Amino acid sequence: MVAAKDMSDARTKAANLLQQFEECVKSRAKAEFEECVESRAKAEMVAARGMSDARTKGQLARVQARLLQAPGDTRKVAEIKEENTILKCAGDTRKVAEIQKENTILKRAVQIQASKLQESAHKAEEVVQLRKLLAEHEEKMRALEMHNYSLTLHLARATDGSHFRSNHGPDVC
């Protein structure tokens, strides 16, 4: 069997194989029925989306073919239908397991993103507080520089002025 080039080519090939299967069932004898079953199984597998899906569809096609082979035996038909249901459930179980695994991964990713967002918000709040504190300290520094300058001027006047100097000696006790 030649591999499909793309999805539309695969669907076309699958449709052709299904058509061949239907023609095969109508025209061939029971001896050639197994070939028809394989043809149907291949068609189902080509149309599948993944390996597990292909296996499940191939098994389902074989079960359906056995149903066609024994239409009169109700007990056998019931057993085949039960097997068919089990196979469908197995495929669904795999899908559910895959979805649960993906869900777990996504939940963890959301938790990580939420914690990063919370951390980022906390850091942003801390930056705002630090900027306010910086502005307050800069204002205090300016005020202290002004006060220092003022004291420096007063000291310079006090040391240069003669009216503060007197010819008195130092205070002696």
Image: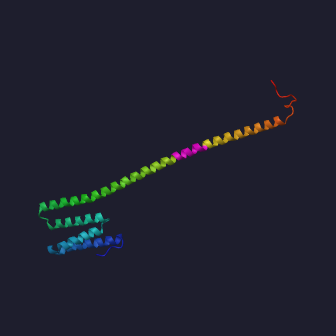
Q: Quadrant of the N terminus?
A: bottom left
* Outermost front residue: 173
Residue shown at the point (19%, 67%) measured from the top left: 65
The x, y position of residue 93, in whole percent, is: 27, 57
Could you tell whether 2 is left or right of 121 in the image?
left
Quadrant in the rendering for residue 23: bottom left
- Residue in view at x 30 percent, y 73 percent: 13
User: In this picture, is 109 found above or below 12?
Assistant: above
Q: Residue furthest top?
A: 173
Q: Position of residue 39 (x, y in %)?
A: 23, 72
Q: Nearer the viewer, residue 58 or 166?
A: 166
Part of the protein shown in magenta: 122-131
Quarter holding residue 68 = bottom left
Q: Quadrant of residue 40?
A: bottom left
Task: Where is residue 67? Give x, y as percent.
Answer: 17, 65
Helix, strand or loop for the magenta stretch, by majority: helix
Residue 147 is covered by the magenta coloring: no
Relative to 30, is 169 on the left or the right? right
Q: Where is residue 107 shown, x and y percent of the image?
A: 39, 51
At 18% from the left and 58% from the top, the residue drawn is 82
- For the C terminus, give its image quadrant: top right
The residue depicted at 53 percent of the width and 47 percent of the height is 123
Vertical relation: 112 (above or below) 17: above
Q: How is the protein colored in the picture?
A: rainbow
Residue lying furthest right in this view? Answer: 167
